[in-house]
Image (cartoon, rainbow, N blue to C red):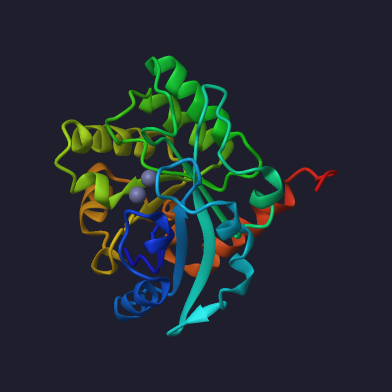
Amino acid sequence: MDIQVDLHTHTVASGHAYSTLSENALAASHKGIKLLGMTDHGPSMPGAPNLYHFGNLAIIPDELYGVKILPGVEANITTHEGELDIPIRYLAKLKLVLVGLHVISYPGGTSEQNTEAYIKAMKNPYTDMMVHPGRPEFELDLERIAHMSAQLNIPVEINNSSLSSKKRGARENCRRFARYMAHYNGPVILGSDAHFTDRVGEFGHALALVNEVGIKEQQVLNTSPDRVMDYLASRRKNRPIITHT
Ligand SMILES: [Zn+2]
Ligand SMILES: [Zn+2]
């Protein structure tokens, strides 16, 4: 399986990542990545950029070092209702909206509350893809998420960084989640979640898991830039029309 797209990478703008977009794009070009998502953390995370960052992304060139660039966000779920930390008028203009749960931004809760928050965020018409459900900080009903991913046709990430994490439970959760994704046949993305340039385009752990559990190549969206761009375009067609600014 050839992964030509890395949708989940961070730059210095995230506060706890250490490479620039240009450095990440150069690394991506060396690894054969053709489309690169720049998804810095949403503003509720300490050290993350404020809304001005997300309002000015149109100045970023479409291509760097021969790699197409998709500027976006990794938005934070902030409540049990699945609300996000970026207003809709900003989300509406972003080319890529990843959504996940992170400490500090999200208050935590029971497995049921966390799962409900995650699924409500999946149903948000401005959400494109969900990230790292396998991270062990918040307990989630991983089977229900895999089932909803297939029902809603919302891709959920198998995160290469979670799989190389030493955090207790991370690898086991990811393995369990990947098995459910194989079973329910929902759309999958592989993400590097790079916080430094050398991790960009690294999918070794995620690919090994995909093969181990039998996730089909057809399920994996980021095997080609065209598949990703077609999905993002179709997602935008279904959005409600905004009546406020
Ligand atoms: Zn981060
Ligand atoms: Zn994250």
- Count of numbered marks: 0
Q: Which of the two residues, 183 or 169, is positioned nearer the viewer here?
A: 169
Q: Quadrant of residue 67?
A: bottom left
Q: Residue at x 51, y 25 (%)?
A: 117
Q: Quadrant of residue 18?
A: bottom left
User: In the image, is residue 154 above or below residue 34?
Assistant: above
Q: Residue 17 at what x, y percent from top left?
A: 32, 58
- Residue furthest right in the image: 243
Q: Residue at x 50, y 47 (%)?
A: 42
Q: Which of the two residues, 63 or 195, is positioned nearer the viewer here?
A: 195
Q: Residue 46 at what x, y percent from top left?
A: 40, 43
- Residue 11 shows in this picture: no
- Residue 98 shows in this picture: yes
User: In the image, is residue 73 above or below residue 2?
Assistant: above
Q: Is residue 82 left or right of residue 141?
A: right
Q: Is residue 226 left or right of residue 200?
A: right
Q: Is residue 172 left or right of residue 63?
A: left
Q: Is residue 195 left or right of residue 228?
A: left
Q: Residue at x 61, y 62 (%)?
A: 230
Q: Residue 100 at what x, y percent from top left?
A: 44, 39
Q: Residue 193 at what x, y percent from top left?
A: 34, 54
Q: Residue at x 22, y 46 (%)?
A: 163
Q: Quadrant of the N terminus?
A: bottom left
User: In the image, is residue 194 above or below residue 135?
Assistant: below
